[in-house]
Amino acid sequence: MSAPDVHKVKAYLLDLQDRICAALEQADGEARFTEDSWDRAEGGGGRTRVIGQGAVIEKGGVNFSHVHGSALPGSATAHRPELAGRSFEAMGVSLVIHPHNPYVPTSHANVRFFIAEKEGEEPVWWFGGGFDLTPYYGNDDDCRHWHQMAHDACAPFGDDIYPRFKQWCDDYFYLKHRQEPRGIGGLFFDDLNELGFDKSFALMQSIGDAYAPAIVPIIEKRKDTPYGERQRDFQLHRRGRYVEFNLVWDRGTLFGLQSGGRTESILMSLPPEVRWDYDWKPEPGTEEAKLYDRYLQPRNWLEV
């Protein structure tokens, strides 16, 4: 089994960030990313790239980070005691794109690599990541396309990968306190190392490379759909669920904050405007109700 090549993973992630930013700038047609390079006092740094107030994108970010340290926070080693006493490196690309138009879904993607080392022992390492879609007004064609891209990214690595990672995504992006999914899912995986380094890395690359071809056609189809105050209000209401998930349940957010990560970059994922209305419920039979009745339900979108 080949040893992990940290430099190779980092080079891929930096290139992925460049390619995704270029694709999103082209899809927006107006706004450009600005870059904020930063260093972490405890070790490492990153490139935070943000975009906003464009023709399509209200706020978004595509971040690269590579942090390292001599020891992990206690919250991490409590769940993974084998990591105690090891130095670590964690690197990844993470992005969230919040559109102006409520008919364009919010999208999220992340691919990452973690390695912990101790002299005289084998390194502990794994890959993780995925991508998921959070529509405000659902569309069957968009859901099928999104999940077809997810399926195709996984297909070369075994017939079991897509259904396993899809179910993992459905389970992970679930607001337990609301008893509802965040969106229509996609892929999620973590602790991936059983395929060996080369094949695990190739699978992570395939998933990272699939994000832009998955989201750009959806943006192109929906960005000019007319909308009014009602649709905007519903978008802001549903964004509240996005905020709740990221601050309460998301492991990446918690790890980043607990390990001394850069707060501005970690919380870049939050939308610029959001609202909470007490005990709000959609009127039965409306397009807003359809999101709950049809799209926020477990479904095999490849067969719809």
Image: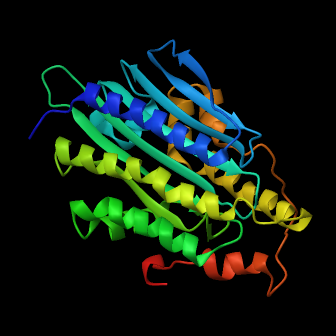
Q: Nearer the viewer, residue 83 or 32?
A: 32
Residue 100 spot, x, y in % from top left: 76, 52
* Residue closest to the eye, 62 or 3: 62
Expressed as whole percent of the image width and height from the top left, the position of residue 174 reads: 56, 63
Indicate whether 28 appears above or below 277. above
Q: In this orientation, does residue 56 appear?
A: yes
- Locate residue 49: give its quadrant: top right
Quadrant location of residue 290? bottom right
Residue furthest to the right: 229
Q: Position of residue 189 (x, y in %)?
A: 37, 54
Q: Is residue 11 left or right of residue 134?
A: left
- Closer-to-camera residue (124/242): 242
Q: At 14% across and 33% down in the image, what residue appears?
A: 3
Q: Residue at x 47, y 55 (%)?
A: 213
The residue depicted at 64 percent of the width and 42 percent of the height is: 269
**How many marks are shown on the rendered structure?**
0
